[in-house]
Image: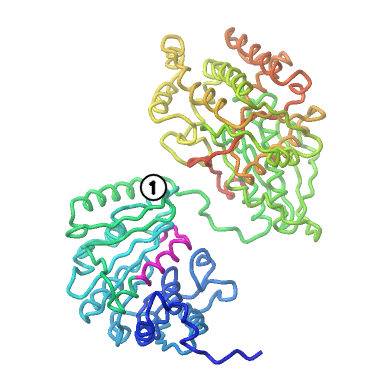
Amino acid sequence: MTPPAFDYQEAFSRNLGWVTPREQAVLRDRRVAIAGMGGVGGSHLLTLTRLGVGAFSIADFDDFELANFNRQAGATYSTLGRSKVGVLADMAADINPELSLRRFPDGVGEADLEAFLADCDLYIDGLDFFAMAIRRAMFAACRRLGIPAVTAAPLGMGTAVLCFLPGGMSFEDYFRLDGADETEQLLRFLVGLAPAGLHRAYLVDPRSIDLARHRGPSTSMGCELAAGAAASQALKLLLNRGPVLAAPRGIQYDAYRNRARHTWRPGGNRHPLQQLTLALARRQMQRLAATAPAPGASPRPEGRLERVLDLARWAPSGDNTQPWSFERIDDNRFIIQGHDTRAHCVYDLNGHASQLAVGTLLATARIAASGEGCRLDTEFEPDSRAEAPRLRVRLTPDETVQPDPLRHFITHRAVQRRPLSTRPLTAREKAALEAAVGPDYRLVWQEGWRARQRMAGLLSLNGKLRLTLPEAYPTHSSIIEWHARYSDDRIPEQAVGVDYLTARLMQWVLGSWSRVSFMNRYLAGTLMPRLQLDILPALLCGAHFLLVARRPPADYRGYIGGGEAVQRLWLTASRLGLQLQPEYTPLVFDEYVRTQTPFTDHAPSQARARQVSERLRQLFGQPESDGAVFLGRIGAGQPPRSRSTRRALADLMPGN
């Protein structure tokens, strides 16, 4: 079917009412310059094209790539590698075939600014945030040529708008960039754009802002809101209709926080409030630069086997010990070499905790392999033994294997040690969790206020045992990485689950066993840690659960199988948006008591272990406790803002 001839009046007739027919004709006659066809620039062009603006000058030297997909209007799979100017020009011309388009596919430099701005009635800034040199030159040229200029920055899930009008405050006078180095210029630009700072309240990871590497977070919502805000200012400027707030006045609107602010900073960044904000921003950047990078920044390995192992290494393990290494045989085969920590960790009775961890690793590798269209075939090596399990693994392409949706949550699964919502789990959530563990395991629930109270009593007693047991001190004194948000081989302090003052006290006390003994004997040293680590989390959650094997594990192979069930349970919880925390140590002390295995000469600890075992069995019953594999709490809540990461894959593959 042949499309009808293009009719400008009909195409933009629905604008009428908000604009008059005469004003629509004026817009048709106006030219807008937009430098940058990426995050906001492309949306600016398309929004103004739909408004009926008839002519544009557009510039960008870049091509589309995958990293643009989250926000850029022209970024699609079919446009990968294509010129941004070419793609957006085609999109705009598809809306209005009569457009007058001047294209600058090599970008715009200081030498051709006047050619780019020739005959333009308005300039809208779509340049990359970090392109400060050309941005300064562009705004200076607009001022010299008497062209109004608008910048609408996408910030979080909102936008901040500043207008610079002929005869008003200049871009340079407002931002005061002259003489500053690049990092300082970027800070001044960011702070000056949005003095109200509405977006800062929900930035979950400040490390995502990396001024040195020219990287920062973005959203499509911010870009589209920026385009709407800029186009609204453009309409008023092009039609000479209504007041426009010009620098040093601005507007910030944030859809996430449901807030809007008019800002006024006489003197721009010279204003005392701006000076204070800049000082705080500099300090934050210095702190971020001095700490480890955020997790998940490493490039994806090229080989299939390496991609599987790169995901598998994110499996959970007690205290982030990662009791495994990998031996690469060829492109499809590798060996998992496990080990345990029974020689120095009282919680790794007979290596069972480490064997569970090897099982979580195996489950993670199996899920990762499904994303490569492979099944995972495994067998124990002849020299495999309990203290050093050794598995030969093969990746086998299989057309019947469907990608497991749990693979998307492997790197996001984490321990949440802080209080959760007391909302009961829904029937749907429980059914999904119970299905996740498979037919050889079942979940026993402790739900409701009274059950959580009983669990709080058990965990409080267990906490006192852990904190007063001499044999536990070497583990406690070494597993925390103090003052850290992330740790690749321990638990970072901010993920422990205590407040700052308690953390400082813990750090000092754990400096020696004599301090621990003194605090426990004379100053109720276990009270605050137990309250924050055991009692409150036990009371504030959706439920506690016990993972029970229908046939109790007979050897290390059984515990590895149990670990596979644990990981599928945990990843399913993550997929459901639930948070989970292991409560494993009561099972350890119960096994010490049940098997009459000596673990200490400290008589009070022996007595408390017996009490822990008795309470556990009172809560869950004798058969369930005998078949117990894992214990934990679960509930709705926000994911942790701090977490353990993992050692690099290269470190886990010695000799490869």
At 23% across and 53% down in the image, what residue appears? 274
320 shown above or below 200: above
Side of 229 where 527 appears, left or right: right
Image quadrant in which you'd find residue 20: bottom left
Residue 129, percent across and down?
36, 65
Please report the bounds of the magenta region as a residue range: 215-232
Q: Residue at x 74, y 22 (%)?
A: 625
Q: Is residue 553 left or right of residue 44?
A: right
Please, is residue 586 above or below residue 377 in the view?
A: above
In the rendered image, residue 363, in percent from the top left (x then y), is placed at 71, 44
Residue at position x 64%, y 15% from top?
A: 612
Residue holding disc 1:
201
Q: Is residue 218 magenta?
A: yes
Q: Residue furthest top?
A: 603
Q: As shown in the figure, which amino acid type bears the numbered disc 1?
A: Ala
On screen, residue 133 above or below 209: below
The answer to whether 325 is drawn above or below residue 48 in the figure is above
Corner quadrant of residue 354: top right
Figure quadrant of residue 157: bottom left
Q: Horizontally, is 263 left or right of 403 in the view?
A: left
Locate the N terminus by quadrant. Answer: bottom right
The answer to which of 374 and 17 lies nearer the viewer is 17
Q: Position of residue 127 (x, y in %)?
A: 37, 71
Q: Residue at position x 58%, y 90% from top?
A: 4
Neighbor class of circle 1 (other Cα within 10 Å; few <14, some 14-19, many 20+) is few
SS assignment for the magenta stretch, majority: helix
Task: Determine if the magenta segment contains residue 121.
Answer: no
* Secondary structure category for the residue under label 1: helix
